[in-house]
Amino acid sequence: MHSHRLSLMGAVLAAALFTAGCGPAEQRTAVPIGGASGAELAERQVFRRGNGAEPETLDPHRATSVTAGNIARDLFEGLTEMTPDGSVKPAAAESWTISEDSLVYTFRLRSGARWSNGDPVTAGDWLFSLRRAVDPATLSDYAAILYPIEGARAIVAGEAAPDTLGVQALDEQTLEIRLAAPTPYFLGLLTHSMSYPVHPPSVERHGERYARAGNLVSNGAYQLTEWVVQSHIRAVRNPYYWNDAETVINEVWYYPIDNQDAELRRYRTGELDMTEKVSSRQVDWIQRNLADEFVISPYFGTYYYGLNVTRAPFQGNRELRLALSMAIDRDVITERISGTGEIPAYSWVPPIPGYTQQLPEWAGWTQAEREAEARRLFEQSGHAAESPLVLELIYNTDDNHRRLATAIASMWQEVLGVETRLSNQEWKVFLQTRRERRQTQVFRSGWIGDYLDAFTFTELLHSTYGLNDTGYASERYDELVDTAALEADPARRRALLEEAERVLIDDHPIIPLYFYVTARLVKPWVGGYVPNIMDQHYTKNLYILKH
Amino acid sequence: MLRFTLNRLLGAIPTLLILIAVAFFLIRMAPGGPFDSERQLPPEIEANLRAAYNLDAPLHQQFLRYLADLARGDFGPSFQYRDFTVTELIASGFPVSLRLGGLALLLALVLGVTAGTLAAMRQNRAPDYAVMAVSMTGISVPNFVMAPLLVLVFAVLLGWLPAGGLGDGGWRHLLLPVICLALPQVAYIARLTRGSMIEVLRSHFIRTARAQGLAMHTIVLRHALKPALLPVVSFLGPAAAGLITGSVVIEQIFGLPGLGRYFVQGALNRDYTLVMGVVVFYGALIILFNFLVDLLYGWLDPRVKA
């Protein structure tokens, strides 16, 4: 993106350089602005983004939320980075080699990489960081994401010391990571904040207060300068960043605004350049008034209803599960209820490159055909319109979930004569109810992939997976998932995962409803914004146009 | 006086203890815990977390330990905001809430008492009806309707004021939130003042003053106002506490970093220590306000001292 050179904007760039302080960058390469487009950079390169809920921490190893991830991506740099098309490119690592058995990854670290205090980033720092990430003392919620690394699981469980982790610093600039099993998505995993490096002396000096403004030393394009909880977080460019010469924006402000109506108002007054989300109630208004600034793109997530297959009426009753699923008109759901361009879902894994969606045959039917089949299956399942089935559908308290549940209940009523009792619960209560599986029948759910690979969806319904709240336990499915997890050959692995999904869709312990989208407002003067399925945006790739 | 003060302060201790105990066990009874999330938390990691936050001990031991920490002024670490202690969060949020609530209270008092007095002096005439009508609206239009409406007009359409955030903490950022917070209280105080002022103006000593030929404004300001303010003062304690603690909605709508937001989010996140910290802090604050009001009441009405 920053490959073009451009000689215009002398004054503007000089000003930008001046405000950036005296970083090591002697010379700036320019951004693809000007020339034929005639666009010009704004003098003030400040980017202000709405950032949802207040991040729980900015320590990359303890952060779990999307909003903390948004900030961590600017402050830190992983070995690899995700490009908008979903491929992985070198970031803090210049290059790497992978052993033939796919178990040993050797990374060549970027020469000249520095921390925001000027210290060089060494392989030893990476070693320290990865050990810290899995050390039980770090109290990392997300440590499990590093389980593919040899020894990680035992360390997290407290059965082995952190220095038994399969990572080695071969020299100052060479890092070797050994895996427990071939993990084709491992390079993608390294874009996750759990794998980001932390500055060892700062961690040792500040301990739990390491991630505070003033203490935090990071290796990304920006450094943290201010953090006023519930008000704002401010980061300025890191002059020591290896690619600072191509960074354009000087300053980023992240505003924690969890109320989307408030966020929209602040966007309209020009206090924000970009929102984190929009409220679905506002979509109509936005489409009428701010259509040019409204950006909608697919997101790596599935909205679905889980069916508790450990109890009646769903236990051992595949026909009933399918009948309920087919009776739902997903086009009505996505066009009239969710209404932000969501994609109707008939299968489990959202569409991603390198994986074929496993649509059931009935996905291609008309809704009338589906409904006829639903009625037939419903009768076959031992239920009939004369003795109506009564179901309970629980969802977490939220206007959108309520509207969707009401629509689905009426579809079930109309097509199958099923009576649905809607019950909403506060989030944490809901999570507990779902997990206990004692009383749930149908429950709302959604899943966002952690890394760009079908496996992050497939493993969720493995019988031993902690979040499999449906209680689905299929020997065949488990076997396929387990085999895929150890399969080094990408084509064979893909075939295994796809077959697993076919088994799953055939058993139907879940009712997929739609694939998520990201919908947000972006001011016309924000350049370089590229929608992507993981919704990851690096401020270093953005720039502010003159406006 | 000293004895009165001491008695009140000693009396506050059991009240606070009961408050702490009730809050502590109630939040623990709420289903779900601080570490429940939609994501997978492997059992070994959850065990680590529970041990680190002392959640694996029996509940009564946790309670005793909490009391012991509290006695040392330690509210504990926040479960949700992992980089901060509860004390730090309260210290950063309270000044904002205090400024917001304090300004709103001041505005409510000045406007409310003035409007109420004017209405009482022109009872059953146009100014009276106007004040009463406006104050009825003020009471019945909730904050969460008024605030977005004002933002829409003054920030989005006219562009005079910011739509949210604390910014540099200047008046432009506080004006709308303070007005929204004060409006219902203005209305309430105006009605209280009017009612009690009408009563006072009918009393014998006022009639005496009028018989002596004093001007109406002198009578109101010098003689009637002080007794007429008694109900307002008794309302002041709960109102002050309500304003400072009850700005939850306003803080949310305007994105202000006050204490109210922690209360709600703490409860939703099952951030036990944060909720407890805010409850204890608010509890102590309300007790303090009621005590101050009692003192003020004694000054306004000498009969109370007896």
Image (cartoon, coloured by chain):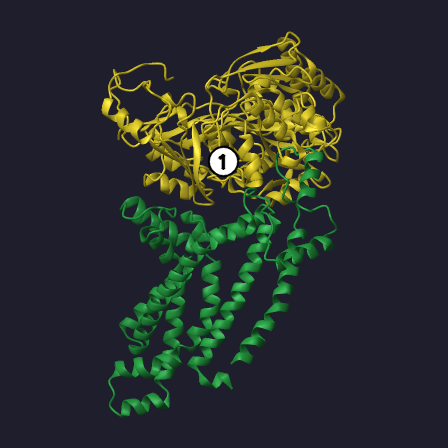
Binning the other alpha carbons within 10 Å of mark 1 as few (below 14), some (14 to 19) or many (20 upward) gives: many
- In percent of width and height, residue A495 lies at 64, 11
- Answer above or below: position of B66 versus B269: below
Left of A258 or right of it: where is B66? Answer: right
Indicate the colour of chain B.
green
- Would residue B206 be visible to someone looking at this image? yes
Left of B249 or right of it: where is A289? Answer: left
- Answer above or below: position of B77 versus B220: above
- Find disc 1 in the rendering and name its residue: A216
Between B74 and A331, the one lying in front of the other is B74
Question: Residue type at mark 1?
Answer: Leu
Between B60 and B117, the one lying in front of the other is B60
Q: Residue, x 63% and y 25% (percent of image)?
A: A146
- In percent of width and height, residue A307 lies at 67, 33
| Chain letter belonging to callout 1 | A
Q: What secondary structure is marked by label 1?
A: loop
Q: Quadrant of residue A207?
A: top right
Left of B96 or right of it: where is A159? Answer: right
- In percent of width and height, residue A450 lies at 57, 26
- Answer above or below: position of A9 versus B163: above
Between A244 and A505, the one lying in front of the other is A244
- Would residue A365 be visible to someone looking at this image? no
Q: Which chain is yellow?
A: A
